[in-house]
Amino acid sequence: MTESGGKIQPEDALAPSAGLVGNLSAQSLLLLLNSPNHPLAQMVRFGVMTIMSASMTVGLPIVLHELFGVRPEVAAAIAFASAFLLNFLSLRRLVFRSNRGAGHDFVTFLLSSLVFRGGEYLAFLATLAVHVHYIVGLLSVLTLSALAKFFWYRRVLHGEENRPAVAEDG
């Protein structure tokens, strides 16, 4: 990495000498995705987190029941609780990189999750009331909810008052 006036240049951070070979566009994309504040980077991390959470919610009960004989009701409860904790930790530390107190973020996440889950269920019931096939209704509701959650959590867990101050060079 090269330095210019004591500062490491971002375009040099992923230079081939750093072990990453590729064109400048690919390197710029990697830098962008590593950015703590860029909405695209947060959206990609949120998508990865959502896939991990869904995999845990579906896969863990199957593993617990099929391999360890855990009753399905208990296995599902363990999966839901585990996914809830995974979601909280990953949203707070990986996706939005909150610097607020964990207690504040946890209460906010808990209340938000309850409201979102209730809203998802009511919206799902509404799709059934207008005779939308239940799978289409469920997928539609969950997709729209995931988008709403991204913007809500971005505002709540990474709002203006939560962003680190940027030092200005005089």
Image: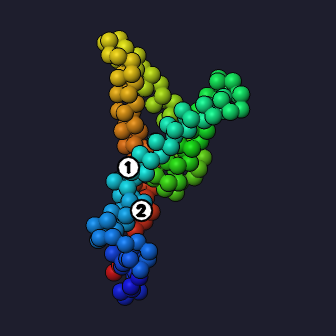
Q: Is residue 85 visible?
A: yes
State whether residue 2 is above or below residue 19. Answer: below
Closest to the observer, 53 or 16: 16
Q: Which quadrant would the N terminus be assigned to in this image? A: bottom left
State whether residue 69 is above or below residue 13. Answer: above
State whether residue 153 is above or below residue 111. Answer: below
Q: Residue at x 28, y 67 (%)?
A: 25
In this rendering, position of residue 70 left or right of residue 164? right
Q: Residue at x 38, y 56 (%)?
A: 41
Image location of residue 34, percent across then percent down: 41, 62
Q: Is residue 10 visible?
A: no
**Whole-number angstrom distance, CA of label 2 to CA of label 1:** 12 Å
Marking on residue 12: none
Residue occupied by mark 1: 43
Please, which residue is most extreme toward the right here? 69
In this rendering, position of residue 159 left or right of residue 59? left
Q: Residue at x 37, y 14 (%)?
A: 128
Tell me which label, 2 or 1, sits earlier in the chain.
Answer: 2
In this rendering, position of residue 110 left or right of residue 131? right
In this rendering, position of residue 73 left or right of residue 92? right
Image location of residue 124, percent across then percent down: 40, 20
Q: Which quadrant would the C terminus be assigned to in this image? A: bottom left
**What's the amino acid at mark 1?**
Met
Residue occupied by mark 2: 34
Image location of residue 121, percent across then percent down: 45, 22
Q: Residue at x 45, y 31 (%)?
A: 116
**What's the amino acid at mark 2?**
Asn
